[in-house]
Amino acid sequence: MDDGGRTRNRGGRPRAPKPTFAERRERRAEVEDVAEVLDAAARFLEVRPRSVHEVRHKLTTMGYRSALVDEIVVRLTDLRYLDDEAFTRAWVESRDRSRPRGEHALRRELRLKGVDRTLVDEVLDQRRNEVRANAVSAGDGGLPSPDDAAAERLLRKKLPAILREPDPRRRRQRAYALLARSGFSPDVCASVGRSVLEDVAATEDGQESDGP
């Protein structure tokens, strides 16, 4: 580094300073090559699936002109690299599988992704029907809601940490708080927490009665 704070390369010549974000945006605003915008979109999509809104917002924020961004979005949609219906289904399925959330939380997340409300309604209705169909085929007359099923999966996944609390009242509080933070309604938090913890308590009582 020289006395002026500039970085020098191996030959001792000062390197040109990196362009600022504003300068990069200014350069991109002059871009005419569709391939460059397509490449930027492809890199953004490499990390995970994105909604149409996310891609459009990303490219616009980078500074590319709206006309080029629109062209790329249409092209990617035609090629099925962008598909809000598939994105929404994958998002809900991923949450249900690894990080269960209440319907309210799912709607909020998808709204932030710019997914149309009608499409979200459709996907969540199908989720509800699938849960009910599975309950019927399993002989469960209670027909649990998707939120009941998701809340129970989440609570049982986190149960070891909750059971480290010996006080039953505090266990219920912790279970309720966990579910509430994950977007489940108060009714679901209360009913699922009570059901799971009562099941655990009954199991513990049975083990004690079988002891010496």
Image (spheres, helix red, strand yellow):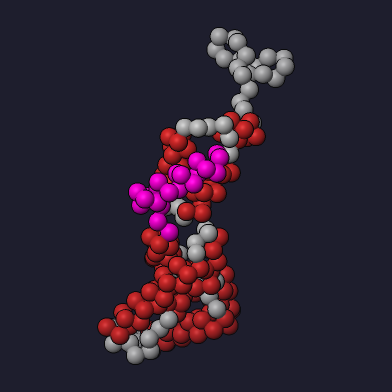
Quadrant the C terminus occupies: bottom left
Residue 206 lies, with reference to residue 26, above or below; the image says below
Q: Residue furthest right?
A: 4
Query: Residue at position x 46%, y 77% from top?
Result: 147
Residue 196 in picture, x, y percent from top left = 45, 81
Q: Is residue 60 visible?
A: yes
Considering depth in this image, is 211 or 120 the residue closer to the camera? 120
Residue 137 in picture, x, y percent from top left = 27, 83
Q: Is residue 119 left or right of residue 172?
A: left
Query: Residue at position x 30%, y 85% from top?
Result: 136
Residue 141 in picture, x, y percent from top left = 34, 90
Helix, strand or loop for the magenta stretch, by majority: helix
Residue 160 in picture, x, y percent from top left = 46, 70
Q: Is residue 197 visible?
A: no
Region rendered in magenta: 64-84
Considering depth in this image, is 67 or 200 the residue closer to the camera? 67
Residue 24 placement: quadrant: top right
Residue 1 placement: quadrant: top right
Query: Residue at position x 51%, y 81% from top?
Result: 188
